[in-house]
Each structure stands twice: as C-alpha cells, then as structure tokens.
Amino acid sequence: MAKKTIKAKEEIITDDLVDTKEKETAPEEPLKLIVNGKRLDGRGFNDLRPIKIEAGVLERADGSAYVEFGDTHALAAVYGPRELHPRHLTEPQQAVLRVRYDMIPFSVGDRKRPGPDRRSIEISKVTREALEPVVFLKHYPKTGIDVFIEIVQADAGTRVAGITAASVALADAGIEMSDLVAACSAGKVDGEIVVDVNGAEDNNGEADVPVALSPKNNRITLLQMDGQLTEKEFDKALNYAVEGCKKIYQMQKDALKRKYSVLTEGLLENNNKGSE
Ligand code: UDP
C-alpha cells in the first residue's frame, strides 16, 4: 500500500518536471498589440493617450510645467535668465540654454541608477536642440537659462513629454520665444502606424519616431527614428506625429491661458477690494 503511494508521488513529480520542461522550451507567443482594429489600451491608430498639461506648478522655479501622456509623467523647471556658472561658458552676445533630462530611480520598473548615463545625455542634447530655435537667446546676453526635466513615471515617449513640458515652463518663466514647441511620437506596431506609442508598444513594436514641432514657424525641431520603416510608412508616421503635435500645442496654450487667467482674476479681485 505504502509502495503504491510512493509510486504515485514519483509519477506526479515526473509529470511536474515534464510540464515545466515543456513550458521552458515552448516558444513564447508574440504579444498581440492590435486586436480587432484597436490597440491594447483601447485606442484607435491615430488617438493620443489621455493628456494633461499644467503650467506653473513649482513655487521656487522661475517657470515650471507638469505633463502627462498617459502613464508617462514629466516635470520641467526653468531657472533664469541668470548669471552663468562656470563664468567662462558665458556668451557675450546671447544667453546659453542648458538642458538636463533625468529619470528618477522609481520612474521605471527596474530601479534606474541615479545620475546621468549615455541615454540621458543624448536626450538632454536633442531636447536643447529642439527648444533652442524658438528661444530669443540674443535678448539675454551674458546669461544662462537652465531647464531641468525630471521623468517621474516612464511609459515611453518621455523625451517628447519632456520637451512639451520644458517649452511650457520656458513660457511660464517669461522667456521671450517665437513659439512653443510641442512634441509627440508615432510608431509601428503589429505592422500598423500608430501615434503616441505607450510602453508595451515601444517594447514590442517595430519602430518609434519622436517629433517636435514649432507649429507657428512650421518647423520640425526634433526628428529621430528607432527601428525600420519603408518610405511610405515613415511619411505616415511623420504625419501622425505632426498631427499629434498640433493637438498638444493647443493644450499647451490652454494650460498657459488657464494659469494666467487665474492670476488676472486674482489681481482684479485684489484691486476691487482695495478700491472698496
Ligand atoms: N526605459 C526604461 N528604463 C530605462 C530607459 C527607458 O524602462 O533606463 C523605458 C521607459 O518606459 C521609456 C521607454 O523605455 O519611456 C522608451 O525609452 P526610449 O529610450 O525609447 O525613450 P523615450 O521613448 O522615453 O523618449
């Protein structure tokens, strides 16, 4: 009787081992990113994630903004124009724009090691280049304008969310600019061109095209591509990203108007109280 029990146990153990082995060697099913013409989060191909933009969120910065593209959350702070340190970097004829993009350690699944790395140095550089064309640097000679971007939560599109936030923060700081810069990405997932890729789409997709646009000047100030696209697909992705930028541009302007209409209302109220 006892022997039978042991045998049964052995069989169970052997069965378990076979199961596990089969599971280990079975090829993983590729994640379907588009089901019945919809993306996994329910969006159509040309739909942005829910977007939130707020201007003037930090008390101690000269200008600031907070931006959400779905689960990607970015905070931007601007200091300046102010004396530049180290002094030898000063330009006699214009301001020096400096940008630091950073992901905070708990912004991603695996803890991000604090401090700059190759990726953040590259994103800081392309962000500066995306913003510089709209800033009237010559209006502020011998000064520095510092832009800090912190990615609080990352789910793809952090550089475009950061650029969008930084541009609103610069305007909030009262820095003279010819226009705002709005940024958005497009990509290819499951063979389809889609706008504003999220984390799952970025990790499992075929291409990602981040774009920044100064709509009034009709100027693209950032254009990068990761992955492979045909010329036709690239044109479509670029069109989707530019359309996305234009929608985001409107939201940036609304955020600035909201902040300044609240301020104006406050000033009017105080004036009325003073005259009573
Ligand atoms: N990411 C991550 N850890 C890192 C860097 C990136 O998890 O150290 C994720 C994060 O969600 C990020 C995404 O990968 O948004 C895509 O990163 P990419 O370099 O393409 O830049 P992004 O799309 O954020 O501008």
Image (cartoon, rainbow, N blue to C red):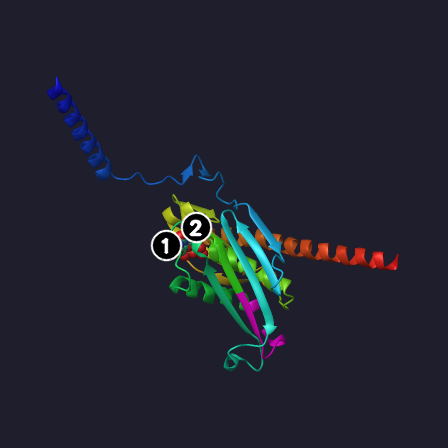
Residues marked 2 and 1 touching at CB (< 8 Å): yes
The kind of residue on which mark 1 rests is Gly
Q: Quadrant of the C terminus?
A: bottom right
- Asked if residue 135 can be seen in this view, the reply is no
Find out whether residue 26 is within the magenta segment.
Answer: no
Percent across and percent down for residue 113 are 39, 59
Query: Left of 138 or right of it: where is 211?
Result: left
Percent across and percent down for residue 273 are 84, 56
Q: Please tell me which residue is depicted at 75% across the width and 57% down the height of the picture.
A: 264
For the record, the magenta segment spans 133-147
| Circle 2 crowding by C-alpha within 10 Å: few under 14, some 14–19, many from 20 | many
* Outermost right residue: 276
Disc number for residue 187: 2
- The residue that label 1 is drawn on is 227
* Residue at disc 2, secondary structure: strand
- Asked if residue 199 can be seen in this view, the reply is yes
Q: Quadrant of ligand 1?
A: bottom left
* Residue at disc 1, secondary structure: strand
User: Camera-side residue: 71 or 51?
Assistant: 71
Q: Look at the picture and state if 236 lies above or below 7.
A: below
2 or 1: tag closer to the N-terminus? 2
* Outermost front residue: 2
Q: Look at the picture and state if 167 lies above or below 106.
A: below
